[in-house]
């Protein structure tokens, strides 16, 4: 399994603020993912990366952006937070083959935008 | 199109009773299938996974799941429920595109 860290765990912020959610993993995994999860709902992929300088949008459209300058870090940024961004954000990573189909998740960041 | 369907958004069982959480998939390619558990205010923890080896897969915390291709199912079971099993359970599939498709989740409640 991967050790995946997310900070902050909880964030309450006002509308219009810029925020960055941090995600880091210590296993050197190339593949990393961001999911959005509304309370009691399924997870939706919003961003993914297959390695340094690689980022792609996921299946759910999101106003957030991501960067992958270092293998271990995959931060997510919202330039101007809105109440509609209130959600839980989960970061995940996958090991190299032969287990690359498996994703391991961090503890999540619960975001509340007032 | 590939999809994962979980039947029953809420399941309640008595402590000590059998736990059965249902998951069906739709896929044109052989899938990898997963069960994850999510405790309140936490991320997802991998319970078990099917990767085309044995059809009966054993996971952590006494859970197991059986892959049945003829029924396109991957139901999760545990012989005897414990209070600590109360959580949200997600079935997910990887259908060859290196992404996970999740079901809508099943909230398991354990009745003392």
Image (cartoon, coloured by chain):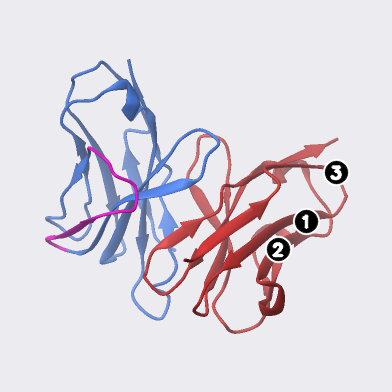
Q: Is residue B18 visible?
A: yes
Chain under label 3? B
Question: Residue B112, how many percent across, how many down?
Answer: 86, 35
Q: Is residue B7 left or right of residue A50?
A: right
Q: Secondary structure at mark 3?
A: loop
Q: Are marks 1 and 2 in contact (CB under 8 Å)?
A: yes
Question: Which sits earlier in the primary sequence, circle 1 or circle 2?
Answer: 1
- In the figure, the shade used to draw chain B is red
Which residue does the numbered mark 2 point to in the structure image? B75
Q: Is residue A60 above or below residue B55?
A: above
Which residue does the numbered mark 3 point to in the structure image? B15
Q: Secondary structure at mark 1?
A: strand
Name the mark nearer the viewer: 1 or 3. Answer: 1
Q: Which residues are magenta?
A: A52-63
Question: Which sits earlier in the primary sequence, circle 1 or circle 3?
Answer: 3
Image point 43% across, 43% down: which residue?
A107
Question: Residue B105, how many percent across, how many down?
Answer: 60, 47
- In the figure, the shade used to draw chain A is blue
Q: Is residue A85 left or right of residue A54?
A: right
Task: Tell me the crowding category of disc 3: few under 14, some 14 to 19, or many 20 or more residues within 10 angstroms, Cα based.
Answer: some
Question: Which sits earlier in the primary sequence, circle 3 or circle 2?
Answer: 3
């Amino acid at each position: 399994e991967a050790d995946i860290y997310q900070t902050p765990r909880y964030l309450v912020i006002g509308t219009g603020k810029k925020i960055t959610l941090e995600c880091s993993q210590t296993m050197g995994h190339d593949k990393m993912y961001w999911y959005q999860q509304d309370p009691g709902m399924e997870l939706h992929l919003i961003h993914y990366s297959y390695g340094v300088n690689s980022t792609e949008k996921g299946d759910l459209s999101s106003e957030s952006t991501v960067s992958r300058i270092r293998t271990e870090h995959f931060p997510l940024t919202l330039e101007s937070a809105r109440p509609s961004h209130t959600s839980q954000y989960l970061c995940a990573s996958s090991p190299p083959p032969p287990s690359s189909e498996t994703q391991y998740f961090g503890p999540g960041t619960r975001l509340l935008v007032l | 199109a590939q999809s994962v369907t979980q039947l029953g958004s809420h399941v309640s069982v008595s402590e000590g009773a059998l736990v059965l959480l249902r998951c069906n998939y739709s896929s044109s390619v052989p899938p990898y299938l997963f069960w994850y558990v999510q405790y309140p205010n936490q991320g997802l923890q991998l319970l078990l996974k099917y990767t085309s080896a044995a059809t009966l897969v054993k996971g952590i915390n006494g859970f197991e799941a059986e892959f049945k291709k003829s029924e396109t199912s991957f139901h999760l079971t545990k012989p005897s429920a414990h209070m600590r099993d109360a959580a949200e359970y997600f079935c997910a599939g990887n259908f060859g595109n290196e992404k996970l498709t999740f079901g809508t989740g099943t909230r398991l409640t354990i009745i003392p």
